[in-house]
Image (cartoon, rainbow, N blue to C red):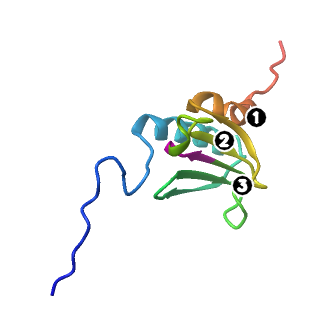
Amino acid sequence: MGVVTPFPLPWRPSQIGFERLELNRILDLYGRMVAAGHWKDYAIDLGRDAAIFAAFRRSAERPEFRIEKRPALRNKQGMWALVGEGGQVVKRGHELGPVLAPVERRLMKLVEE
């Protein structure tokens, strides 16, 4: 007989992704970090339970930072997480802006008067 393919359920997506505004904010930060000379490469992993944006200093290394979106944690500790190079969670929250703040602080430089 034939092969039966299960119909995807509407309340459980088969793949988690970034929305346009979220990706714009992440790529804006990535572009500023590239211009400052901190990052050189990136990777995006869209999986069943998480969407991950990884930023690399060099392409042959582990990512310096990973920005993770896990909707399953939305009602608990927040679906956004900033994960460092060693795998430690640097910042976690319900909104993307405050989670990206530790990385954006690296771009700030003291300006002399």
* SS category of the residue bearing label 2: helix
Residue 73: x and y, percent? 56, 41
Instruction: Return the residue at label 2.
Output: 33
Residue 103: x and y, percent? 71, 37
User: Three-letter amino acid code at disc 1?
Assistant: Arg
Q: Residue at x 73, y 64 (%)?
A: 61
Instruction: Return the residue at label 1.
Output: 106
Q: Which of the 4 image quarters holds residue 56? A: bottom right
Badges 3 and 1: C-beta atoms under 8 Å apart?
no
The residues tagged by marks 2 and 1 sit, at their Cα atoms, a distance apart of: 9 Å
As drawn, 109 above or below 103: above
Residue 102: x and y, percent? 73, 33
In the image as oriented, which residue stretches furthest toward the bottom? Answer: 1
User: Three-letter amino acid code at disc 3?
Assistant: Arg
Quadrant where the C terminus is found in the figure: top right
Q: Nearer the viewer, residue 46 or 21?
A: 46
* SS category of the residue bearing label 1: helix
10 Å crowding of disc 1: few (<14), some (14-19), many (20+) = few
User: Three-letter amino acid code at disc 2?
Assistant: Met
* SS category of the residue bearing label 3: loop
Locate residue 52 relative to residue 88 in the image: left or right: left
As drawn, 26 above or below 54: above
Q: Tell me which segment is drawn in magenta.
A: 67-71
Instruction: Return the residue at label 3.
Output: 57
